[in-house]
Image (tube, rainbow, N blue to C red):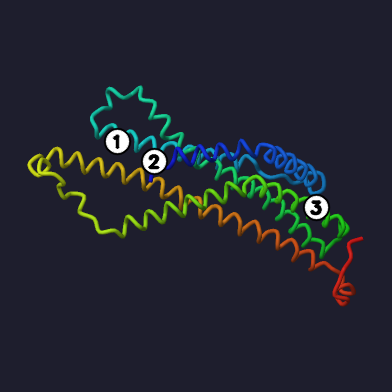
Amino acid sequence: MSGTKPLINCWLIFLFIVRLKQHVKMLRTMDGVDMSFKSAFRKTPNMRKHTWLLFTLFALSMVVPFAWRFYEVYTDGLLSSSWRDPSFILVPLLTAWNILPLLYYHLCNSVARFWCTTLKKTLRREHFKRHYALKFYYEQFLKITAMQETIGDLFNPFVLFSLAWSFMLLSLTIYFVTQPTSSLVEPITAEQVTNESMRNKLNEKILINVGWSVIQIIVAILHICVICANGMKTNEETRNILTAVLAIVPDANADLDRFQVE
């Protein structure tokens, strides 16, 4: 299962290279929304907090596989001769690149939810004192939905592919776990019956491989949870904007079962 990581990363790189045009469009749209909200509401997302979160999770995705690779080399007794081994860098980078697009997806959705929350709170304050016409809020809502559309255009292939390989990996995990297997400490060959050191070395190898598989399984579960959570939260915040808009519609228009943005 851990051997699928290079293939997954290559495909992710290909996806983002192919969708470079959509990426540039998304960044321009987000910049336009940011300037609009900064001008109207004097608010902008706290990118410092998001940057620290991104850096912390990225560093964690590097440290964990590096530590496990270090343990693998140490158990093999090759630590003194492997300090120049490029796998100490390549293996953590493979895991980090597996996580980086997911973190970027979470960042973009967090920024989109910030603007949704800002618009929702401003609309709710309109009950006490009117600052802007309903048409103004409608225009801001259209900007947010246009931005969300550009985010979807960029990340939809990534979301589809990530969910596909994550569910496939979890299905394989369930399959292997439910299969009848022998104990990890049970010898396989006649030589291992009489050679305890060889048997212990084989058990250590199995433990190492299981550890790499567990890391990949955790990454797969993380993809499913983050993608689903971001989708639900962003949709909920967008729905709350519509609820806040309907709450300030004049009663006369509500009685007519319609209202018009002038």
Q: Residue furthest left?
A: 194
User: How far apart, in angstroms, are the residues tagged by discs 2 and 3?
Assistant: 46 Å
Residue 236 percent location from the top left of the image: 66, 61
Q: Amino acid at mark 2?
A: Gly
Q: Is residue 44 left or right of residue 248?
A: left
Q: Earlier in the sequence, mark 1 or mark 2?
A: 2
Residue 185 percent location from the top left of the image: 18, 49
Residue 148 percent location from the top left of the image: 70, 51
Q: Residues within 10 Å of mark 1 (few under 14, many from 20)?
A: some
Residue that appears at 87% across and 74% down: 251
Residue 256: name its quadrant: bottom right
- Circle nearer the viewer, 3 or 1: 1
Q: Are marks 2 and 3 in contact (CB under 8 Å)?
A: no
Q: Tell me the SS state at disc 3.
A: helix
Q: Earlier in the sequence, mark 3 or mark 1?
A: 1
Relative to 60, does residue 146 appear above or below in the rendering? below
Q: Which numbered disc covers residue 158?
A: none
Residue that appears at 44% across and 41% down: 5
Q: Tell me the SS state at disc 2.
A: helix
User: How far apart, in angstroms, are the residues tagged by discs 1 and 2?
Assistant: 16 Å
Q: Is residue 187 left or right of residue 252?
A: left
Q: Which residue is mark 1?
A: 72
- Circle nearer the viewer, 1 or 2: 2
User: How far apart, in angstroms, are the residues tagged by discs 3 and 1?
Assistant: 54 Å
Residue that appears at 34% across and 38% down: 68
Residue that appears at 41% across and 50% down: 217
- Circle nearer the viewer, 2 or 3: 2
Q: Which residue is mark 2?
A: 3
Q: Amino acid at mark 1?
A: Glu
Q: Residue furthest right?
A: 262
Q: How many marks?
A: 3
Q: Which residue is mark 3?
A: 140
